[in-house]
Image (cartoon, coloured by chain):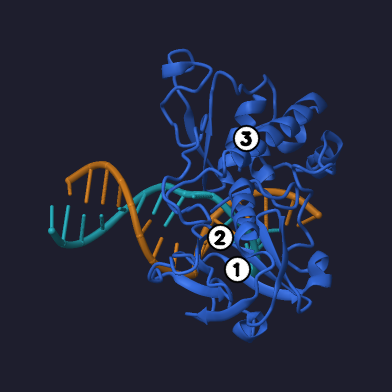
Chain colours: A blue, B orange, C cyan
DNA sequence: ATACGCCCCTGGTGGC
DNA sequence: TGCCACCAGGGGCGTA
């Protein structure tokens, strides 16, 4: 799924095309995805005017003038297809939820694996929703700092890579950007989270910010499941530095002649990629199992 | 509290 | 061409 930069890009696309519009017709093609859709979803959306968007971690919030917000999570394979009036294609077989605004703009939520989530809540309760309440700080916000990261991982004996993917440590980092941020910070992914020193934590905070900001600036990176929210082809292909590049060179050593190439390991059942020359395990540094 | 394995689901890819 | 194992951006849950 989309990680923070992709979710931010989708949210911006929705804001651009849907903000201020009124929802006319809702089509619910199945009862839910990973969890059932909230009761009376269509009725609660129809007739509502859209009054703003926000993102929290990997969640999108669409606020309505009814006093409710729709919560959207794209899971692993979710994408949003926005179409201009009269331009909506025939619905994809995995378009589980769609609506049209009164001006004919079409919104489709497509999610083949159905790991995504849709929920409704009073806008006033956004902060206490069970899926949002335990999220850590926004990595691009002022609340994320070396001190903040230290506080979150100081007692964690899991790997720093797994810790970064824990949404309560910092919100929005997934499997790709965890590898990319650690590469940029020069930190081995198997290091025990609590074993990082303050300079390493500071480097990591800056690396996370840089990686995410670059990806957002590029319009959200993409893999095959992900479409730009306007549905246009020609997705941006992100130049991952290590992710998915096992055996290839990283930018530090083109061709991998110096480091032998990017290494793929498995941590907690997920792939991790790193450069063995740039991301070295210090002598005596504790290694995390996961 | 923390950590880990397993599971949800479909589709693409590469090997035989 | 067909079949099959394996892999994929997430995260909740049950169990130690």
Q: Nearer the viewer, mark 2 or mark 3?
A: 3
Place residue A52 in its image quadrant.
bottom right
Q: In the displayed orientation, state which residue is furthest to the top.
A: A258
Mark with earlier residue (1, 2): 2
Front one among A166 and A71: A71
Q: Which mark is residue A75?
A: 2
In which quadrant is the C terminus of chain A drawn?
Answer: top right
Of A229 and A37, nearer the camera is A229
Is disc 1 placed on a helix, strand or loop? strand
Disc number placed over residue A10 in the picture, else none:
none
Judge depth for marks 3 and 1 and give the one in front.
3
**The numbered mark 2 sits on a residue in which chain?**
A
Name the residue: 76% across, 56% down.
Answer: A135
State the residue position of label 1: A117
Q: Are marks 1 and 2 in contact (CB under 8 Å)?
A: yes
Q: Residues within 10 Å of mark 1 (few under 14, many from 20)?
A: many
**Which of these two is toward me, A262 or A106?**
A106
In three-dimensional space, the C-alpha distance between marks 3 and 1, rounded to whole angstroms, equals: 27 Å
Q: Secondary structure at mark 2?
A: loop
Percent x, y of residue A150: 82, 37
Q: Residues within 10 Å of mark 3 (few under 14, many from 20)?
A: some
Of the numbered discs 3 and 1, the one sitting upstream in the chain is 1
Instruction: Specify whether A65 is left or right of A22.
Output: right
Q: Quick one: A40 or A242, which is closer to the camera?
A: A40
- Distance in Å between CA atoms under marks 2 and 3: 22 Å
SS category of the residue bearing label 3: helix
Quadrant position of residue A36? bottom right
Q: Do badges 2 and 3 share one subunit? A: yes
């Amino acid at each position: 799924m989309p990680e923070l930069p992709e979710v931010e890009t989708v949210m911006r696309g929705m804001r651009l095309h849907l903000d201020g519009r009124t929802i006319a017709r809702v089509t619910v093609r199945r009862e839910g995805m990973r969890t059932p859709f909230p009761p009376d979803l269509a009725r609660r959306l129809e007739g509502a005017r859209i009054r703003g968007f926000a993102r929290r971690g990997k969640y999108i919030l669409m606020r309505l003038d009814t006093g409710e917000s729709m919560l959207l999570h794209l899971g692993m394979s979710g994408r949003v297809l926005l179409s201009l009036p009269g331009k909506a294609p025939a619905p994809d077989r995995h378009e589980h939820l769609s609506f049209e605004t009164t001006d004919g703009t079409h919104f489709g939520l497509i999610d083949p694996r159905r790991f995504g989530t849709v929920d409704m809540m009073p806008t006033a309760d956004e902060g206490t929703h069970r899926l949002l309440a335990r999220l850590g700080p926004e990595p691009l916000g002022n609340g994320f700092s070396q001190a903040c990261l230290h506080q979150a991982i100081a007692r964690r004996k899991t790997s720093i890579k797994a810790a970064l993917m824990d949404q309560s440590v910092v919100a929005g980092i997934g499997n790709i950007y965890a590898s990319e941020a650690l590469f940029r910070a020069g930190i081995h992914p198997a290091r025990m989270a609590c074993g990082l020193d303050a300079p390493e934590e500071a480097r990591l905070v800056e690396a996370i910010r840089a990686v995410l900001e670059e990806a957002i600036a590029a319009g959200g990176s993409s893999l095959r499941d992900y479409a730009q929210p306007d549905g246009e082809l020609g997705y941006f292909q992100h130049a991952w530095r290590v992710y998915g590049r096992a055996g290839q060179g990283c930018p530090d050593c083109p061709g991998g002649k110096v480091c032998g190439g990017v290494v793929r390991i498995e941590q907690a059942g997920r792939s991790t990629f790193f450069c063995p020359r740039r991301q070295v395990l210090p002598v005596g540094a504790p290694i995390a199992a996961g």
